[in-house]
Image: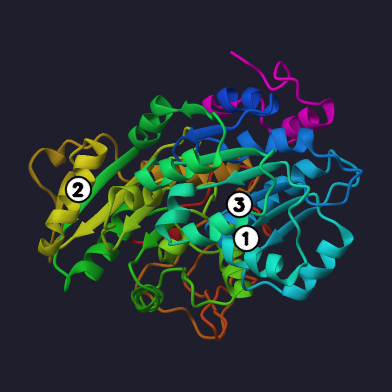
Amino acid sequence: MATFQSMGLSKAILQILRGQGIVNPTPVQEKAIPELLAGEDVIVQAQTGTGKTLAFLLPIMEKIRADRPEAQALIITPTRELALQITVEARKLADAREGMSVLAAYGGQDVERQLRKLQNGAQLVIGTPGRLLDHLRRGSLTLGAVRMLVLDEADQMLHMGFLAEVEEIIRQVPRSRQTMLFSATMPDNVRHLARTYMQQPRDIRIAETSRVTLDSIQQILVECTDRTKQEALIAMIRQHRPYLAVIFCRTKRRASTLNEALQAAGFASDELHGDLSQSKREQVMRAFREAKLELLVATDVAARGIDVEGVTHVFNYDIPQDVESYIHRIGRTGRAGEKGIAVTFAAPKDVEALRNIERGISRRLERRRYEKGGVEAVGNAAQNRRGPGEAAERGRAQGERRGEGASAGRRKPGTAPAKGGSRGQGGSRGGGSAKRGSDGSAASGRGRRGGGREQQGGRRGRNDGGRRGR
């Protein structure tokens, strides 16, 4: 098995990787990094959670010249969240290169600040198509010195209608560049893009890893009606007790309405969708990463941008319309070798969409049915592979291993927070907390981690007083 050291990475980069606890390359890194260091164009097909980001960032960091201020590498992503996520990882690695600067360019952020940073020079630019084109048209960004181009999540980029923008950007990058295309799926439009703009690319497919990614997720279908869907969701949340969960809705309005209902039921939830300001989106994501929120209600704008450790469950409140969206949604859990649970709710009108998903993943989802008394198994689904609380326990254990063993006793769902109460930083989730800001966001002082810690690194308290009563 190849190692990062045997690939020829610099000592400074290796030291940073070791500091992050990254020792052995994943299969996609093992196959892609040597090709990229050799200057080859590559097409990489691999599922989310397989380490694709480092697969292209590490070669870029090795090849960029920090003594030259102009943009030498460009990474195009479909969403702001993904651009921000890649930027965070890139800046960690940039510490190994004195004089190295990374710029994130995406909508909703202060454009004047981006302009100032571009004037000072940024060797690596990471951005969304719209904001990158804005800078190109202003003349604040030039791509004449770019020698490395990454199209990340190419299938989602084209699915969101960015083909014309992406092509306009590519045409402004020198033809002598190295092009890297990363995608979870390879529909015809992605293949056409590769044929048009890449030169004899190496084709790397991580089929086995993709299968493992799906196999690590228990996939459940809950049969219900549109009228009972919200009740079914709450019943499943109480039954499974997720540590962190993402709930996907089809529209912004439905996400907002559902979030209000979950908050009224006593859950620590918030919403993420395109109508929020960038600062609000970053605030929500920060609260979710820090586990100050238990539930994140999101539209598909977040499907590619959420890479949060400890997500134990994904709930498809609205069934995805195609298999690609389904795979990307449930890929928020079961990452990096961990287990996860994905629950999809389906009304009778969703039969065709369900058939397409099951055909696409070559698997029949485990059936459940919601009745007024709760969710019951259907047919062979009674033979569960594991108990519903197991993934949540793993999420809690992850937090404990990171030295965040704060008590996590939570308020019973459906119990209103006490007025004027505040949740102590890292304290137990008793009945008197969850004070929220006027915009519905989690109060900054609320959290399940940090602050007052009980038995550092120990098991989270789950005695009778701290149970969620689910």
SS class, disc 3: helix
At label 3, counting other C-alpha atoms closer than 10 Å, the crowd grade (few under 14, some 14-19, many 20 or more) is some
In whole angstroms, how far apart are the C-alphas of marks 2 and 3? 34 Å
At label 2, counting other C-alpha atoms closer than 10 Å, the crowd grade (few under 14, some 14-19, many 20 or more) is some
The amino acid at mark 2 is Asn
Q: Is residue 24 left or right of residue 110?
A: left
Q: Residue at x 70, y 34 (%)?
A: 58
Q: Is residue 4 magenta?
A: yes
Q: Is residue 380 left or right of residue 81?
A: left
Q: Is residue 19 left or right of residue 315?
A: right
Residue 296 x, y percent position in the rendering: 45, 64
Q: Nearer the viewer, mark 3 or mark 1?
A: 3
The amino acid at mark 1 is Gly
Q: Which residue is mark 3?
A: 170
Q: Residue at x 44, y 53 (%)?
A: 156
User: On residue 356, which mark appears?
Assistant: 2
In whole angstroms, how far apart are the C-alphas of marks 3 and 1? 47 Å
Given contact means CB atoms under 8 Å apart, are the residues at marks 2 and 3 in contact?
A: no
Residue 97 or residue 394, whichever sits in front: 97
Residue 310 or residue 98, whichever sits in front: 98
Residue 230 visible in rendering: yes
**Residue interval drawn in magenta:** 1-29
In whole angstroms, how far apart are the C-alphas of marks 1 and 2? 43 Å
SS class, disc 1: loop
Q: Nearer the viewer, mark 2 or mark 3?
A: 3
